Image: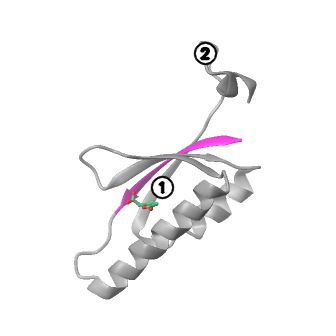
Amino acid sequence: MLFAVKMDVEIPQDLDAAVREDLLSREKNYCQDLQKAGRWVHIWRCAGQYANLSVFDVADNDELHTLLWNLPLFPYMKVSVTPLATHPSALDAAAAAS
Ligand SMILES: O=C(O)CC1=CCC(=O)O1
């Protein structure tokens, strides 16, 4: 199942710099591990925002919830989830088949 997920990041300005760097490092590793596993299939920066628009390919809502809940930055994010369905005009074979 495909989900579009928008993550708006709001890290407090007064968060300790070392804690911030550790969070960002763990977030990057977590994200890249999920990309390698084929779960996190797109991540795009939303231009002009400290936010990303991502696409996840997961078994179900529960798997998505677990992946999002375990994001190191989760406590500092607003997350919105949109389930995706096939668009009838899509040329992309992978999109049409899913
Ligand atoms: O910078 C962001 O958009 C937050 C984020 C999610 C995964 C990652 O590596 O950074």
Q: Nearer the viewer, mark 2 or mark 1?
A: 2
Tell me: residue 21, above or below residue 61: below
Residue to which mark 1 is pinned: 79
Residue 74 seen in the current view? no
- Residue type at tag 2: Leu
Q: Where in the figure is residue 94, as x and y percent of width and height? A: 68, 28
Q: Quadrant of the N terminus?
A: top right
Residue 3: image quadrant is: top right
Query: Residue 42 at what x, y percent from top left?
Result: 52, 45
Q: Picture quarter containing residue 12? A: bottom left
Residue 6 on the magenta span = yes
User: Is 86 displayed left or right of 80 in the figure?
Assistant: right
- Evaluate whether residue 77 shows in this view: yes
Q: Which residues are magenta?
A: 1-9
Which residue shows up at 73% across the image and 30% down it? 98
Q: Is 31 within the magenta?
A: no
Identify which residue, 50 or 81, lies in the foreground: 50
Q: Residue furthest top?
A: 89
Ligand 1 shown in quarter: bottom left
- Dot 2 beta carbon under 8 Å from ligand 1: no
Secondary structure at numbered mark 2: loop
Q: Residue at x 71, y 49 (%)?
A: 58
Q: Locate residue 9, reporting x and y percent.
A: 36, 61
Image: 89 above or below 67: above
First along the sequence among labels 2 and 1: 1
Is residue 20 or residue 62 the one in the foreground? Answer: 20
**Residue at label 2?**
91
Q: Main secondary structure of the magenta part?
A: strand
Q: Amino acid at mark 1?
A: Val
What is the x, y in percent for residue 59?
76, 49
Is 27 above or below relative to 87?
Answer: below
Q: For the residue carrying disc 2, how many other residues have a C-alpha within 10 Å: few (<14), some (14-19), or many (20+)?
A: few
